[in-house]
Image (cartoon, helix red, strand yellow):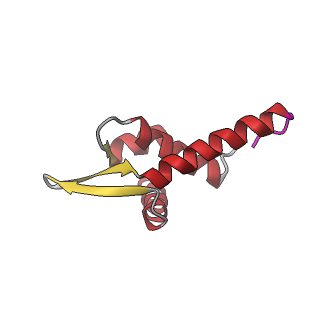
Amino acid sequence: MSVRRSKLQILIDILVTVQNQRANAKFTHILYKANLTHKRLKEYLDMLMGRGFIEEVRGKGRSTYKITPKGEEFLSEFHRLSEFSEAFGIPL
């Protein structure tokens, strides 16, 4: 039986995918890497943009996404917290 990802883990997967793109990340690339449906990814992207973690960049008839400094800071703090919790045997 597979374990479902938490909402937090899905958000982290999206942010890491966008962060790993040196240029702006395309919707389809994020869709495949985060393993989400189109509708669900749109909901998560809207939420992340609303909170200032990513930005939509429009150009040449398509939208791409880039991580903001706030998103970078969130990922950094998440990784720090994750390492701390795992050190005590309590994975997030």
Q: Is residue 63 left or right of residue 71?
A: left
Q: Is residue 49 left or right of residue 87?
A: left
Q: Which residue: 54% across, 43% down?
A: 13
Q: To which quarter of the image does residue 1 belong? A: top right
Q: Is residue 47 above or below residue 22?
A: below
Q: How many marks?
A: 0
Q: Is residue 35 left or right of residue 83?
A: left
Instruction: Point out residue 27 in the picture as x, y percentages from the top left corner.
Output: 34, 48
Q: Is residue 68 above or below residue 92?
A: below
Q: To which quarter of the image does residue 20 belong? A: top left
Q: Is residue 50 above or below residue 44?
A: below
Q: Which residue: 21% across, 53% down?
A: 62
- Residue 44 visible from this viewpoint: yes
Instruction: Point out residue 11 in the picture as x, y percentages from the top left corner.
Output: 55, 51
Instruction: Point out residue 42 in the picture as x, y percentages from the top left corner.
Output: 42, 59
Magenta stretch contains residue 91:
yes
Q: Is residue 92 left or right of residue 52?
A: right
Q: Nearer the viewer, residue 89 or 1?
A: 89
Q: Which residues are magenta?
A: 88-92
